[in-house]
Image (cartoon, grey):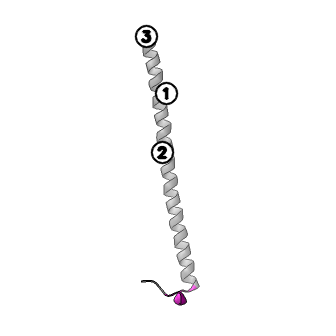
Amino acid sequence: MSIPTSHISAPYLYHELVNDRIQTLHREAREQRLVARISRIQRAERGVRRANERLSRALGMEG
């Protein structure tokens, strides 16, 4: 059920705008945490690949 626009007060609209902004900031923070987590995982995966390559080269040199 919607409120008729003639009955919407300025404080109500301000409150709604503030709540919307807070929700947007929370969503953006969640997205940034996800991006940071993905970046850490990708960096770790690159480190594992480099370590595997070094190990393969070292084992190849032994044989």
Q: CA distance from mark 3 to mark 1?
A: 19 Å
For the point 44% across and 19% down, the residue is 56
Residue on which the image places disc 3: 62
- The residue positioned farthest toward the bottom in the image shown: 6
Q: Is residue 8 magenta?
A: yes
Identify the image quadrant of residue 52: top left
Judging from the image, what secondary structure is the residue with disc 3 in? helix
Q: Residues within 10 Å of mark 3 (few under 14, many from 20)?
A: few
How far across and down, in percent of the image, does residue 19 sit?
Answer: 52, 72
Judging from the image, what secondary structure is the residue with disc 1 in? helix
Quarter of the figure that contains the N terminus: bottom left
Quarter of the figure that contains the C terminus: top left
Residue on which the image places disc 2: 38
Instruction: Give the residue type that dot 3 points to.
Output: Glu
37 vs 23: above or below = above
- The residue positioned farthest toward the top in the image shown: 63
How far across and down, in percent of the image, does residue 57 sit?
Answer: 47, 17
Q: Earlier in the sequence, mark 3 or mark 1?
A: 1
Judging from the image, what secondary structure is the residue with disc 2 in? helix
- The magenta region covers 4-9
